[in-house]
Amino acid sequence: MTLKHRSITALVASLAFAATTALAQTYPTKPVKLIVPFPPGGAVDVYARTVQPALAENLGQTIVIENKTGASGMIGADSVAKAAPDGYTVLVGNVATLAMNVGIYKKMTYSPVTDLAPVMQTVMVNYVLVVHPAVPAKDVAELVAYAKANPGRLSYGSSGSGSAQHMAAELFKAQTGADITHVPYKGTGALVGDLIAGHVSMAIADQASMMPQVKAGKLRALAVGGLRRSPDYPDIPTIAEAGKLPGFEAVAWQGIAVPAATPPAIVKRLNEAFMKAHEAPGMKEKLVAAGLTPVGGTPEEFGRYIRSEIAKWSKVAKDIGATVD
């Protein structure tokens, strides 16, 4: 490359940097849309609506939440992947849309790695194993024993085939040998209603959706899904300890992503806005009360985490034969 060519290349790069910097300084100039790829009432929707006011203040614009549901979150995620890369269409994704679906679905219309740009891991989602009060089991050991003695009699609900709840329960079945029938729903809200009514026997789902029903006496909590007991519910054992399943973990996570070609300066601006939202007065307490543990971090850290989770859950899906056409 000649000196002239190098100068031109440097000039183009300099102008591009200046343009994206200026764009970030003025962004946003209109409302920002958060795409929640799941129905209202679930953990992803709860997170989006909890941070919405603080995020609007940080960005100086209205934040619009749109629930675009279906196919374990893939319809909403795909719409973001194909949206204009200008920072005005933002995905509030989770472990399913950004990792699990890759190993579960034979056909995907987007790639979490190449079609989306990571912004920030937002929260970890604490799970709990709950049963309807009619189920004759007071702990995990009794639940497994009953399921084995009555194959196919128990059923578990999830927010959809291929969802994190589905994967958690299938992993539980694989490690315990329990014969429990899967009943998929269109979202956690529909699942909760049928679980309370006794139309399904149990679920491994987020604490935000299930613990209010446990406190009301409508469901019974047998164990939490994390590797350690929840500080909010220290008397409830983990599935790992109660079921004698060393290393068993049923938790989920959420994170923000935008179309892959979004300028890095806008990605940085969004990252800062979400980080600042987490620091708003009372925000941590609100999230923890909803069963969501704040995380945070850089886009680069989140990108590495997504890739590691894709590898992890693809192996789990293969091992337990959890695939969806």
Image (cartoon, rainbow, N blue to C red):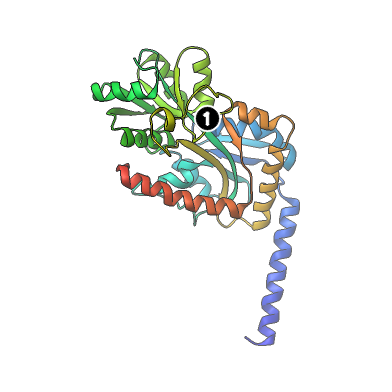
Q: Position of residue 121 (x, y in %)?
A: 58, 45
**270 w.r.t. 237: above or below:** below
The foreground one among 35 and 141 is: 141
* Residue indicated by mark 1: 229
**Mark 1 residue element:** loop
Residue 187, quarter of the rendered image: top left
| Residue at (62% x, 29% y) in the render | 288
The foreground one among 280 and 168 is: 168
Instruction: Say which quadrant the C terminus sits in.
Output: top left
Count of labels shown?
1
Instruction: Say which quadrant the N terminus sits in.
Output: bottom right
| Residue at (37% x, 45% y) in the render | 316
Badge 1: few (under 14), some or many (20 or more) residues near its Cα, within 10 Å? some
Q: Position of residue 8 (x, y in %)?
A: 69, 79
The amino acid pointed to by label 1 is Arg
| Residue at (36% x, 33% y) in the render | 172
Q: Is residue 16 left or right of residue 206?
A: right
The foreground one among 82 and 184 is: 184
The answer to whether residue 92 is seen in the rendering is: no
**126 w.r.t. 142: above or below:** below
**160 w.r.t. 266: above or below:** above
| Residue at (47% x, 43% y) in the render | 97
Q: Position of residue 81 (x, y in %)?
A: 51, 50
The answer to whether residue 80 is seen in the rendering is: yes
